[in-house]
Amino acid sequence: MRLLLIPSLLLAVLLAPAPLVTAEPPAATRPAGQDSDPGLPFIYTRWEQYTVEDGLPNDHIFAVKADGPWIWIGTEGGLARLDKRTGEIRSWTEEDGLPWRVVSAIDVNPLTAEVWLGLFGGGLVRFSGGRFDHFHQLNSGLVNDVVYGVCIENDNVWAATTAGASRYDTITGEWTIFTEKNAPMEEIWNYGCSFDDGKMYLGVWGSGVLEFDVATETWKDYLDPDGEMEIDLYRDDGIVHVITTGVSAVDGTFWATTYFGASRYDGRHWRGYFKKDSGAPSDFHNAIKARSANEAWFSTDKGLGVVADFPTDTWVVYTTDHRSHTGRAVVSRGGQVVETISMSPNLPHNYVLWTELDGDDVWVGTSKGLAHGIGKGYFPGLRRKPVKAQSVESSEIRGGE
């Protein structure tokens, strides 16, 4: 299971009935007609797996961050760095100076190359030049030591914690704390953050998604407008639930995940996703990573789900069957299965906690190790299958072997 301290209110919510969908999907997201073939998305068929046998300090992986030739990996037992050029893994534990063994969040400052770590119970760390600088409740303005998310915003570092959010100005050393006293947080349990186009987005337990405009220092909140905790009363009217576990913003669009479904918002239109009427493998989401306004990766408790093409509502779900030692990718459109592709094992485990996009490649943190999807030949959106007369290998459509 993901390391979560779940507020007591969630116990009542977990016993509630499944979300109710009362309206048809908007025309823009309906699958194409029977006579139309919009094609297939790129399918990742080449995978590598890394576990403690390869040098990871622990197989339970909470965070992954791509940083040029490096892949930083936050685990339940320490920090690791994978060198993509050699495949070698170096790790740091408490014996090596890491202030706390559980690394739950990672971000890298692109200007300074400083690595910032969120620790699950240990605060915030700056790792630079081989040195760990430790910030916690007793020596800084960090509002809480349980840090779920870390995000770089210009010269500032944001930490999403269980008692609010903290922003640290790395130039002046000034800290700013955001709680229910100065931000629209009905609850102060912050699960994640994402920075895009001058705005910081926070995913908050019980408070939906909060948007902070850096230039004006003003807030905007996105809540389920029907006010119902048990069901999504009206389709595509807003965020599907206020128990938000993650947010990822890109290209003027943000994607948000909850324990009861997921949402997409482009500034004008909402789209809600539930397992019962989409390609999502589950309604229980741990995290979300968007590649574009049309593609997003969902880390769930039952596999890795991908909205591969938003306009056509095309999904891909990656899972591994440990009994047969095989993997598969299921392509669906409008909730209907289009194609199933068998492959070698792709994920070490179907309980996915984090997904990181690295150019055309993808890195997936699970409860039993790290997966690397090789994206050689990747293309966005869809492509039609080549006709047989052309004798083109299907691997050109599906991603290769």
Image (spheres, rainbow, N blue to C red):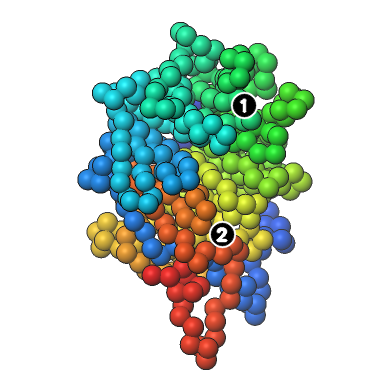
Query: Is residue 335 among what the camera can see?
Result: no
Residue at 73%, 48% in the rendered image: 269
Q: Residue at x 68, y 22 (%)?
A: 184
Which numbered dot is residue 308? 2
CA gap, disc 1 to disc 2?
33 Å
Q: Pick whichever of labels 1 and 2 is earlier in the sequence.
A: 1
Q: Quadrant of residue 141?
A: top right
In the rendered picture of this protein, how many numbered marks are placed on residues? 2
Figure quadrant of residue 248: top right
Out of 96 and 25, give the one closest to the viewer.
96
Give the image location of residue 254, x and y in percent.
65, 43
Tell me which corner region of the image, top left, top right, bottom left or bottom right, holds residue 220: top right
Image coordinates for residue 215, horizontal then vertical, percent: 75, 27
Vertical placement of residue 101 versus 60, above or below: above
Residues at marks 1 and 2 touching, judged by CB atoms closer than 8 Å: no
Q: Is residue 40 visible?
A: yes
Picture quarter with the N terminus: top left
Give the residue at the far bottom of this rendering: 389
- Which quadrant is the C terminus positioned in? bottom left
For image coordinates 53% across by 44% down, the residue present is 288
Question: On the image, numbered disc 1 is attached to which residue?
Answer: 155
59 vs 292: above or below:
above
Q: Is residue 25 above or below residue 194?
A: below
Sort mark 2 into few (<14), some (14-19) or many (20+) by Cα contacts within 10 Å: many
Q: What residue lies at 47% left-to-right and 31% top-to-bottom?
A: 115
Q: In the image, what residue type sits under mark 2?
A: Ala
Find the residue positioned furthest to the top.
138
Up/down of 243 relative to 371, above or below: above
Expressed as whole percent of the image width and height from the top left, the position of residue 394 reads 46, 77
